[in-house]
Amino acid sequence: MINTILTGEVLRSVTRAMVALVSEARFHFMTEKLHSRAVDPANVAMVIVDVPKDSFEIYSPDEEKTVGVDVNRIFEISKSIKGDELVELKLEDDTSLNIKFGSVEYSVALIDPSAIRKEPKIPNLELPAKIVMDAGEFKKAIVASDKISDRVSFRSNENGFYIEAEGDVDRITSFMGESDLIEFNKADAKSIFSIEYLKEFIKAASPGDTLTIFLGNNYPVRLIFDVARGRVRIEYILAPRIEEAE
């Protein structure tokens, strides 16, 4: 049996992060945390979500348990829950997950975990550049870049961190120097990425959340968001777009 209590904000953050890439996922109720990870159908991006037990009001699984869930369904339910409202998740068997908040209780059918696409191995990436910043600033840069292009360049050097996009006639640059960043190691790196994926990723974050970026040269990027007042850690790994030489 699993019986946990968490806030609506935490539940919404977890499910919003997952639906950026998949509609179904495995939730691992582990001793020290709730963990989930998945890769999108195109094998371009991965999401990894961790919620430490201290982020729950109550976290008391009788044993470690893995369940398959329809994250789209739970995300839709979470939209009607206030951020600070307490939500009870109860699992008494392998057929359904009960979600209770206030006077409302849902019983959501579970999915056989073996019927869900195999989880990806988390790659060991050695990426030279580290940039820590306010997620709200990153979000503004991606939204602005989306207005003129379907791809965006992340570039780091000793001067700062650049987010750049170029359309047919327009060009936009968002620049953050060392004083604008929380942490910055001044390493050289540059890669190009699809804005379509990034637009989905930034929905998980709000101004005031912290974003840590690990960037290499024509290599996948790691984007780590600490959201819900630090209670939820969301990591996206996105493959680069390799531009053909003209």
Image (spheres, rainbow, N blue to C red):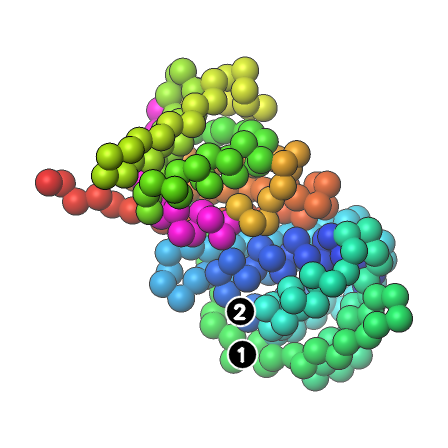
Q: Which residue does the image show at 70% across and 78% down from the upper left? A: 108
What's drawn in magenta, residue-wise? 188-201
- Quick one: 191 or 72, which is closer to the camera? 72
Indicate left or right for 59 with 114 as reference: right
Amino acid carrying mark 2 in the image: Ser
Indicate left or right for 46 with 204 as reference: left
Pair 2/1: label in front: 2
For the image, the number of numbered tags is 2
Quadrant housing residue 128: top left
Quadrant housing residue 179: top right
Amino acid carrying mark 1 in the image: Ser
Cα–Cα gap, marks 2 and 1: 15 Å
Q: In the image, which disc is placed on residue 23?
A: 2
Q: Where is residue 53 in the image (x, y as percent from the top left)?
A: 77, 53
N-terminal-most mark, 2 or 1: 2
Q: Where is residue 76 in the image (x, y as percent from the top left)?
A: 65, 67
- Residue 207 magenta-highlighted: no
Q: Residues within 10 Å of mark 1 (few under 14, many from 20)?
A: few
Mark 1 falls on what kind of element? helix
Q: Quadrant of the N terminus?
A: bottom right
Q: Which residue does the image show at 65% across and 79% down from the upper left? A: 110
Judging by the rendered image, the residue that carries numbered circle 1 is 114
- Quick one: 53 or 90, which is closer to the camera? 90
Res 138 visible: yes
Q: Where is residue 180 in the image (x, y as percent from the top left)?
A: 54, 20
Res 214 visible: no
Mark 2 falls on what kind of element? loop
Q: Where is residue 89 in the image (x, y as percent from the top left)?
A: 78, 68
- Residue 191 magenta-highlighted: yes
Q: Which residue does the image show at 23% across and 39% down from the upper left? A: 168
Indicate left or right for 196 with 106 as reference: left
